[in-house]
Image (tube, rainbow, N blue to C red):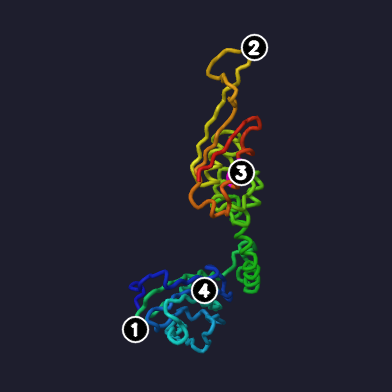
Amino acid sequence: MDLSQTSQETDLLSLVVDRYNCYPGELLTFDIRFTCLQPPGGELQFILPRVMKIEGFDLPEGVPDNVLSLVEREQELILALPLKAFFNPDQVYEIKIKVRVNTFYIDQYLLTRSVLMDGENHPRAAEEIQVAVYGKGSYLKFLPEIYESDDFVGRFLMLLESFWKPISLQIDQMNCYFDPNLTPEAFIPWLSSWVGLPVDSLLPVERVRAILKNAMVFNQCRGTRQALQTYLEIYTSGKVEIQEKRSKNFILGEKSDLGVEIALGKENQPNSILVRIQVPTGELERIDYSEEMYQQKMMTIVKTMVPAHTVFDVACVF
């Protein structure tokens, strides 16, 4: 079969494995997701080297185990699943296959494939995965050279390494936990507490990440127009305009000179700002707020971000 001529329709077939690196004797779990073809018929094939041994599988509900067939061909094993009797056209199914790696203690790559065949035995989609098998554990390099030829020590260290590897990978990628774009969603509240930015549960996680990414701007420019406008534009995903009035009231005295910085009139409000927010369509529906509730929330946010002596007003346009 020439897999290069197979249609790579990713919506028809996908193949993943729980890890792409292992040692001899370890158990791998392959997950195959496929869409049953129209008209019904054909079969799903899972092809693996003979140094791998199938130890178990989970089929879709209602599909008996005896429909599977295993065929040996040269140096490969072919696990075939007919798709006619128990499968409905255009429906998505998923199966899991547990495989034991029974190979030599040498570094090598093992190729596994999954092929979706139609009723005329033509391949419609194919996926393949290459698994790296390491003959010796990397922990041996920390021991004297004499232990490299000791099979018991090598296998014992492989066992420890398999147990500790997920933890080691997590430690190696610790820097990703402090990146707002990469940190897990469950880690965001802890990360936000470091920079003094509380997480609003009403915000989509993408906006929360954007706020954390600009935390330095908010802290270095706190109380400024730049910080307030940047925060509100991220929070609302809308357009924000800010008008400032910095003039002082006219007061009789030695320094009562009229000029640009002096304001006259009873209605004048020195050191005041007006914030206009154009709220995107659908924002109120997303958080299930009324216009008054949203307006009040914006007032609360602005109050925490402007200097205490500043008089402000917020106008939301929906």
**Residue extending farthest bottom:** 66
From mark 1 to mark 4, how far is it between C-alphas?
25 Å
Q: Which span is picked out in magenta?
A: 294-301
- Pointer 1 or 2: first along the chain: 1
- Pointer 4 or 3: first along the chain: 4
Can residue 121 be seen at all in this image of the molecule?
yes
Q: Which residue is mark 2?
A: 253
Q: Which residue is mark 3?
A: 296
Q: Which residue is mark 1?
A: 120
Judge depth for marks 1 and 4 and give the one in front: 1
Q: Are marks 1 and 3 in contact (CB under 8 Å)?
A: no
Judge depth for marks 4 and 2 and give the one in front: 2
Identify whether 80 is placed above or below 288: below
What label sits on residue 31 in the rendered view?
Answer: 4
Q: Amino acid at mark 1?
A: Glu
Q: Quadrant of residue 26?
A: bottom right
- Pointer 1 or 4: first along the chain: 4
x and y, in percent, of residue 246 in the image: 57, 25
Identify whether 288 is placed above or below 245: below
- Please rate how many residues cluster around mark 2, counting C-alpha atoms within 10 Å: few if below 14, some from 14 to 19, many from 20: few
Which structural element holds mark 3?
helix
x and y, in percent, of residue 14 in the image: 46, 71
From mark 4 to mark 3, how far is it between C-alphas?
50 Å
